Image: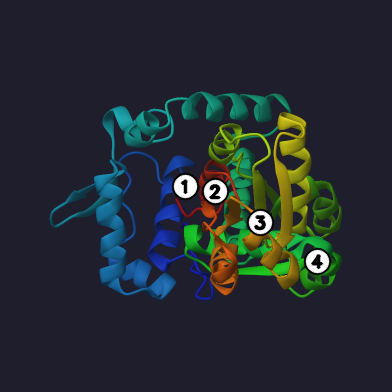
Amino acid sequence: MVKFFIQPESEIPASNQLYNQIMFAIAARKFPPGQKLPSTRQLAMQTGLHRNTISKVYRQLEEDGLVDAQAGSGIYVRQGEDAEGTGSVTLLKRHPDTYKVVRQTLDDLVKQGCSLNEARDMFLAEIDWRLRCSAQVLVTVPADDIGAGELMVRELEQALKIPVQLVPLEELGNILNQTRSATVVTSRYFISNAEEIAAPKSVRVIPVDVYDYSNELQILSKLNPGTCVGIVSLSAGLLRGADVYIRSLMGEKLLLMSTKTSDAYKLKAIARSASIILCDQASAEAVKQAIFRVQDDLIRHPKIVRCENFISTNSVALLKRELGLS
């Protein structure tokens, strides 16, 4: 009998945990087409969940085309055309290339000497491990650019709807010694250092890409030569990168001034001198306050352009899938 396990301490809702486990059990043919699934009473005794929660999961599985509910009899894995491949026509339609990837991966494993049972166990073990790792998400960056980590945590907590912990890269090893499973997220710039620390502890690291700032660069390209542009961010690394990148594209066309929000003197100078100020969401309020404090010295208030993202939207979407949250 297939055993299902719910992690009470996980940030992933219990209903999602159960749904994913049943779905992958069907995909791995632990429940072949036509087989009856455990009753809500049996699953309640096994998992500790309320029967109403389990009924909700079964309804979702039925809506997604994985199972059929037969009145007075129970829940059965759907037969017919769903019996082919992964057992879910709905999922195949949603991800048309998935079936080819699954078949090719299985073919490769068999060629290497694995039995189908061994391949199934490997898939399920990897899935279970990733679900466990998803319970704790750590963002890590070097201590000298901890502001970049603060921006990442801010955006990820908003997008993922789960707590995210910020850990300086220099302290990552000690933190991982104290946890059984976690997922480490970092900028692609720091991936090698993070993997070097996390790999020996069997902790996976997922890199994310920084937003490309194409809209903001387009705004800058239309400014008159000599325009004073201020750039304000929590991240020292972002400020350095922005300065180099803008100069490489536009030469000395614009007068650039940049600072972290913690440097009140430079922030005040930018508020007085800049015609336009680019800032991240976390710095916007500090920029507004700086302008307010020097408004008596201004002929015209600088225009504030707030960058909505620090992490690319594609990276956030991929991370959601990796964590089982999409």
Label 3 vs label 2, nearer the camera: 3
State the SS at label 1.
helix
Residue contact at pointers 3 and 2, CB within 8 angstroms: no
Label whose residue precedes the other's in the sequence (4 or 2)? 4
**Image coords of residue 225 (percent x, y):** 66, 34
**Three-letter residue code for mark 1:** Phe
Q: Which mark is residue 172?
A: 4
In the rendered structure, the answer to whether residue 100 lies left or right of residue 68 reads right
Mark 3 → mark 2, Cα distance in angstroms: 36 Å
Res. 105 mark: none
Is residue 61 visible in the rendered image? The answer is: yes
Is 263 in front, or is 110?
Answer: 263
| Crowd tier of the residue under label 4, counting other residues whose Cα lies within 10 Å: few below 14, some 14–19, many 20 or above | many
Secondary structure beneath dot 4 equals helix
For residue 316, which numbered disc appears in the image?
Answer: 2
Q: Which mark is residue 24?
A: 1
CA gap, disc 1 and disc 3 = 59 Å
Q: Position of residue 129 (x, y in %)?
A: 63, 56
Q: Which residue is mark 3?
A: 273
> Is residue 181 visible to us here?
no
